[in-house]
Amino acid sequence: MRLLKNNLIFLSILSISLSLFFSSCSSNSKDAPEINLENKMSWAETNVFSTPEDAESLNFIPIKNAHDRNFWHTVGKKGKYIWIKINFTIPEELQNQDLGFIIEYLHFAEKTWINGRFVGQYGSFPPYEKSALWTAHQYDLPTEILNSDSENTILIKVWCHGFSKISKKVFITDINTATYKANYITYMHSKVFIFFEGGMFAAFLLFFILYLGRRQESNYIVFALTNLFTLQLGQILFAQESPFYNLNSVNYLTYIKYFECICFIFSLYFLQSFVIRYIHNKPNIILTIIRLFISLGCSVAVICAPSYNVLMDMSIPIMIILFLQTLIPITYLVSAFINPNYKSKAIIITIGLTPFFICVLADFILRLETFERDIPPFHSFYGWQMTIIFFLIVLTVRFNKTLSMNEYLNKHLSLEVDKKTAALKESKKELEEQLDKNSKDLKMASIVQQKFFPAPSRNFIGWNLSIAYNPLNEVSGDLYDYYTVGNILQGFAMFDVSGHGISSSLITVLAKNILSQIMKQNHFTNQNSSMILKTFNKQLNDAKGAVDNYLTGIICTVKKLSIDGSCSMQLSNAGHPHPILYNAQSNKISELRPEKGIENFGAIGLYGSNINFTDLDFSMNTGDILVVYTDGVTEALNQNGEQFGKARLMEIIQQNYNKTSSEIQECVMDELIRFIGTKQRNDDITVFVLKREKPENFIEDIG
């Protein structure tokens, strides 16, 4: 905001200075006598071959107001010749001296006679037409061609092309005053802009050189190019002072195409680019390409215009297209005002462009016929200079800040590095302490979780059990448990919680507690396995609430023991890998799946989802082996991306059927570890091996 205040103060001082400058430059010859010819003019249409003698026979129409002075209203814009006739008498105070005839502005070109004597011309007629533009038209009238005691006649043959008009200010005065006023008008309408051109050229060079040194500052190059094209556009205001314009080899149409049309198109394009890049250093590439194609398309259309008439016809459509193009930076500006991060930049852009737009509006109003002002659009150019100066200050201040920061960093780099290093060391120490604390907490959580689980190997009457439990991290999402009365096995459970880490491990603790209570009650109620799963699902959903984790798993219960040593079993599966059963009598191995046509689906803990758990009954005899596992076993990958798979697991079980459950479990784990090799695991591993033994061979575990 301080920058804005400083810039506003500067622009205010600049505006006051310019006003004082222009007021001090006003004519000091107001008291010199002059003949006002404003109401003495009349016109008549003619042709290229018409001479002053021919003009005497024409029917002249009085020029009464601004509408009449705008010849394009009456003869059109396509190119016509007219005569302007002015009759006047010389007042006593101007007699017997050389006089000067002044036309403030006349477009397109003219040749002038007084009393039948040719006195000069401004601009050129076709086929080498060329306008005098904004230079004041002064004709010297020596006493020998003037009628002091009778009427004088001025005839002006005008080539009307485009927006042809003659100014309201047409007068005759003494030669010295005429010369002074002509020079003053030419200076104010034309030459004064040469100073501004020098300023813009300096701004172009400065920011072009700055950009070469700092390529990341794209604002510099677009601002430099904005100045480059604008100073070429401004050359049209003082073209008569340029030797290049007055060369016979320079075609007026070509000159106008480049300096007035193409330079205007690209001045607007780079101004828009500056606005956009000031707000967003990396603008939308698609919108940038669209704007560039619009500008190039308009430029190609201008270049291809075969004549001045066609160029004028194209001007309005091109201006409409360029206006639509301007909606893109306006959209950027509006969105910047809405976004707090860019609002300050939007304010700076708006303030910088305000003088220009105010002056454009002033020029538009003053050039309306109501005001009858015959002046070039120099207010717009003055406003543009204030905008250029404003942004020059803004970019210079930004550059100085960057330079100051670099100097500060160079000077205090060692100190800054030491500060940053100390801060990093402190942060590293705090992080290491936190990581150490977290590691200890996780180790403690792992110990607590594993204490929750029963012993991994145990003998029961008629059973030999071994469990391999290998978490991926300190804590696990795998859960196993078995349920006994003394040395009699009543059932077991295995579940796999979705996800990994602490949340999964906490769910295992919660699930184990709930499941233990249900299995204790089942000792008295002897429910089917599927009913146990449904009860477990309901109670777990109530307990965990909106927590996303769910479980897949198996409940298996021992239903009946026979005298011959066989045992009736029942299991229910909730989306878990199918258990593997080895039959010792037939030496066959298979998966325990529901019979074909029986629907069994659903998982535990998915609130609101449909479930349908069924019971699967089977029997186990002496030597039979039941293996239950989590998907971390079969889905484990080796270096080639191959899965361990069920077939490999079943093969290991069948090859080692004559071993104890502990030995079979070790064979499975050894082969699994060898298969994985150095490949990183991505899941917990749990293997549950239950082998049916003869009850009379039971030996109770010690300890």
Image: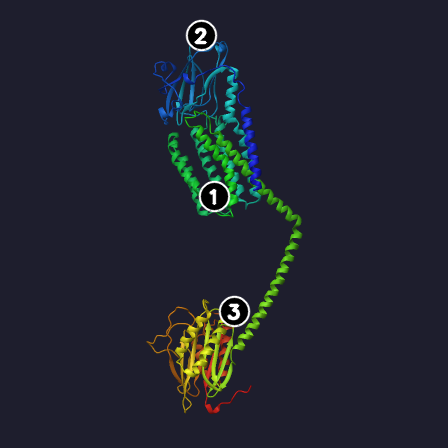
The answer to whether the residues at label 1 and label 2 have Cβ atoms under 8 Å apart is no
In the picture, the quarter occupied by the C terminus is bottom right
The answer to whether the residues at label 3 and label 2 have Cβ atoms under 8 Å apart is no
Q: Secondary structure at mark 1?
A: helix
What residue is at 57 percent from the left and 32 percent from the top?
A: 13
Residue 336: percent from left, percent from top:
48, 45
In the figure, 215 relative to 387: above or below?
Answer: below
> Residue 317 lies in what quarter of the image?
top left
Q: Amino acid at mark 3?
A: Ile
Residue 605: percent from left, percent from top:
43, 71
**Which dot marks residue 181?**
none
Marks 1 and 2, how far apart at CA: 68 Å
What residue is at 48 percent from the left and 77 percent from the top?
A: 480
In the figure, 410 relative to 157: above or below?
Answer: below
> Residue 312 lies in what quarter of the image?
top left
- Count the marks: 3
| For marks 1 and 2 on the same chain, the one whose residue lies earlier in the sequence | 2
**Which dot marks residue 502?**
3
List the residue tagged with mark 2: 149
List the residue tagged with mark 1: 333
Marks 3 and 2, how far apart at CA: 117 Å
In the figure, 151 relative to 170: above or below?
Answer: above
| For marks 3 and 2 on the same chain, the one whose residue lies earlier in the sequence | 2
